[in-house]
Amino acid sequence: MKEKEENNKNWKLKLRYGKIKTPFQHYTVLADGIVEELADDFKCPPGKAWMGMKTWSSSIEESMDMIQVIGEQIGFKITGKIYVYDNTEPNQPPRDDPYGYDINFTPYND
């Protein structure tokens, strides 16, 4: 158990120095839209908001697709622009498949 915890702690170093290999890049994605009715795990009042998410994916386009699909699944409709920032600092290690995490919402008024 202690060895597994140690491996989990050192994943960033292993990734940086090529001991962990992944076909994916890390991105941070922001989308402008409207919160309709969010799934139970998420909190934000209905109305205009930014959705933020971090992704491990194969391309900017895939990250854009991911925020659209995941947003729809949890009650967020994208009505504006999507911004993708590449090579951002990850908080979770890559997996065998693309995935999104650290999803959050920031409401705003015009």
Image: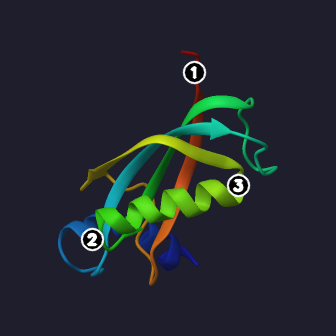
> What type is the residue that disc 2 sits on?
Leu
Q: Position of residue 102 (x, y in %)?
A: 54, 51
Separation (CA) of disc 2 from disc 3: 31 Å
Name the one closer to the observer, 49 or 90: 49
Residue 10 visible in this rendered orientation of the protein: no
Separation (CA) of disc 1 from disc 2: 36 Å
Please identify, in this view, whether the residue under mark 2 or under mark 3 is nearer the observer: 3
Q: Which residue is mark 1?
A: 108
Q: Position of residue 92 (x, y in %)?
A: 45, 61
Compared across the picture, whether 86 is left or right of 71 comes to left
Q: Name above or below for residue 82 compared with residue 43.
A: below
x 27%, y 81%: residue: 21
Q: Earlier in the sequence, mark 1 or mark 2?
A: 2
Element carrying mark 2: helix
Badge 2: residue crowd in 10 Å (few <14, some 14–19, many ≥20): some
Q: Which residue is mark 3?
A: 74
Element carrying mark 1: loop
Q: Earlier in the sequence, mark 3 or mark 1?
A: 3
Separation (CA) of disc 3 from disc 1: 19 Å
> What type is the residue that disc 3 sits on?
Ile
In what quadrant of the picture does the N terminus appear?
A: bottom right
